[in-house]
Amino acid sequence: MIVGFVGLGNVGAKLAGSLLDDAASASDGVGIELVVHDLNAEAMGSFVERGAGSAATIEELAPNVDVIVTCLPSPAICASVAETMLPLMKPDTLWLEMSTTDAEEVKRLGALAAEHNVTLLECPVSGGCHRAATGNISIFAGGPREAFDRGLPLLKILGRQILHTGDWGTASELKVITNYLAAIHLAATGEAFAVAKKAGLDMATTYHAIAISSGNSFSHETEGQLILNGSYDINFTLDLVEKDTDLFLDVARNSGVDLELAPVVRAAFADAKDRYGPRALSPRVVQRFEDDLGVDFRSPGFPAEMIDTEPREEGYEVTV
């Protein structure tokens, strides 16, 4: 099976790496031959050195694969790539779209793919780059059940917990809902750390108190440690949080729901983006409190980057 992979960014490179590792081991009988494409020649070169093939253009890649995976930074880029590749793809090609994108756009792309006899399965991921690197990330998959069944052997290589969410658009909606929760938890962590610091509490003790309490969250356990270290390096940037929050607000607006907290959270991240730049790391939303209060939240013993210490496990479908 020839698998083309488009988009070797922070998440995409790690997902593609799981496919390449599987191709090298060939332990599951899937029989993957990986071919990559990215505008960054250096990113492609690192995969070629490890044994992957490469394609200089989408036009070169699209007609020559059985499955194509895309992991791209914005709906506009996804649309541009899709409109280039779909007319060139072989009939019955499977397209796994792993970007975080707009649900209505996914529905449009699914219909467009069907016109070219290509099957789309939207597959956004959740869990952070460190879990993408180990194949332990979670995957939401939206599309026809038949497409899900076709894609499941590959999805089990890419991730651990795989949930079929329903028709096109459902995975994207759930992804931005969960990303919104992660954003609000991160912003709340900043407020909690600020109060703890000004109250004279030890920051390591504060971290562990939250971690064993009902106030714990995935954001606290991951980004909280990077904030205390001072690296902030979660491999996710403020402009991406803003994009995802806007997609969540679109879902709410289209569903007729007036929100109270989301606009406040979006404003906090917009303020951080104005202060530190759009490509600043997303946990720097917390740095605003450090700067405004003239303190820092540093505490020794916390890591500069997140490493998934759980052993890699074979992926499986989460049934509802």
Image (cartoon, rainbow, N blue to C red):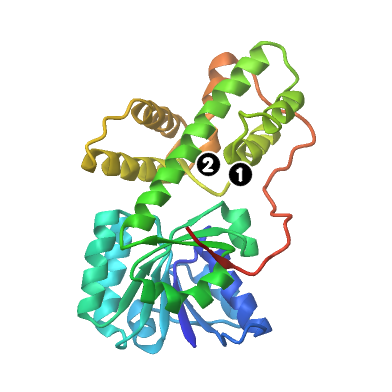
* Local SS, label 1: loop
242 vs 144, nearest the viewer:
144
Q: Is residue 74 visible?
A: no
Residue 295 falls in image quadrant: top right
Instruction: Answer left or right for 307 relative to 36.
Output: right
* Label 2: which secondary element: loop
Q: Determine the residue located farthest toward the top in the rendered image.
A: 199
**Which of the two discs, 1 and 2, labels the residue nearer the N terminus?**
1
Residue type indicated by callout 2: Leu
Q: Quadrant of residue 16?
A: bottom right
**Residue at 53% of width from left, 27% of height from top?**
188
Task: Report which residue position mark 2 lands on.
Answer: 281
Which residue is farthest front? 320
Residue type (three-letter) at the residue carrying disc 1: Asp
* Residue position for label 1: 233
- What is the x, y in percent for residue 145? 37, 71
Residue occupying image coordinates x 39% and y 47%:
176
Q: Position of residue 84 (x, y in %)?
A: 26, 75
How many discs appear? 2
Q: Is residue 296 above or below residue 119?
A: above
Calculate the distance from the C-alpha at mark 1 to the C-alpha at mark 2: 6 Å
Category of crowding for the residue at label 1, using alpha-carbon neighbours closer than 10 angstroms: few (below 14), some (14–19), many (at least 20) = many
